[in-house]
Image (spheres, helix red, strand yellow):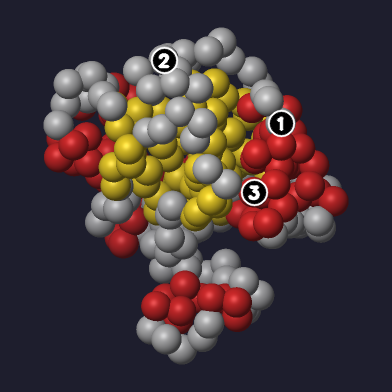
Amino acid sequence: MAAEPSPGLRWGVVSITGNFRENNEDRYHVDEKGRYFVVCDGMGGQSAGERASGMAAELVPRRLEQALNFQDDPAEKVVSGIDDAVGHANAEIMALAQLDPNCSNMGTTIAMLVKAGQALYVANVGDSRVYRLRNGEFQQLTMDHSLSQALVLAGTISKEDAATHRYKHVLVRYLGSKEGGTGAEAKSLNIQAGDRFILCSDGVTDGTEDTVLANLLGKFSEPQETAKAIVDAAVQGGSKDNITCVVVFVDCVT
């Protein structure tokens, strides 16, 4: 999915079912005005994961547009608005899970970028991630809410061990859980021309190393071409999940 350039940003999106799944439980939402970018990775079996990720990808943007003007709001209001949107989606997903037995175990991750004023805000719940490439430095901007990451923070295992740990995909926070409504840990980033971002489900990171992602993110001139290359690399790397990648290029700061 390509889009017309908007307020200094260009972007591209690729989302595929992959070679090992029957349905795609990933969902994304890209604002046509370039104000926000959202990636969700559903879970829960059968169609429940699709419903959870679909709800989050619909409800969070709707709530953001109700809460923010994206121009003059101070940082505190933007962060509060992001948390409110995520909390609202979490409550709605939990409510449906209680009402519909087919959705009893559903949940979803979420990773997002929000452009408001002269800043970008990054936020997540779960293990979908946001990365940035700036002046050759590749950095993961989000933290996984997984059991393996909790063990890293506790000093029990190393970051390298976490990459292959058996609890890597066991989430301690996600939308559809009580913990999912405690906020999205949104933080403000200054924007620089030339910045490049990846938002992705874990289908990307399961099939690619950081060095590969960094190389591909800096290699191409078009974000859609970049997103396709990253998804192709994840497939070739053996990813067994749905794969969704949103790539955002900052051409200028407006």
Q: In the image as oriented, which residue stretches furthest toward the top?
A: 4
Left or right: 164, with 70 as reference point: right
The residue lying at 51 percent from left, 85 percent from top is 157
Amino acid, disc 3? Ala
Q: Residues within 10 Å of mark 3 (few under 14, many from 20)?
A: many
Of pointers 1 and 2, the one earlier in the residue sequence: 2
In what element is the residue under mark 3? helix
Kindly identify which numbered label has been placed on residue 7: 2
Of pointers 2 and 3, the one earlier in the residue sequence: 2
- In this view, 120 is above or below 25: above
Distance from Cα at disc 2 to Cα at disc 3: 24 Å
CB atoms of marks 1 and 2 within 8 Å: no
Residue 79 position by quadrant = top left
Residue 73 position by quadrant = top left
Kindly identify which numbered label has been placed on residue 220: 1
The residue lying at 47 percent from left, 72 percent from top is 149
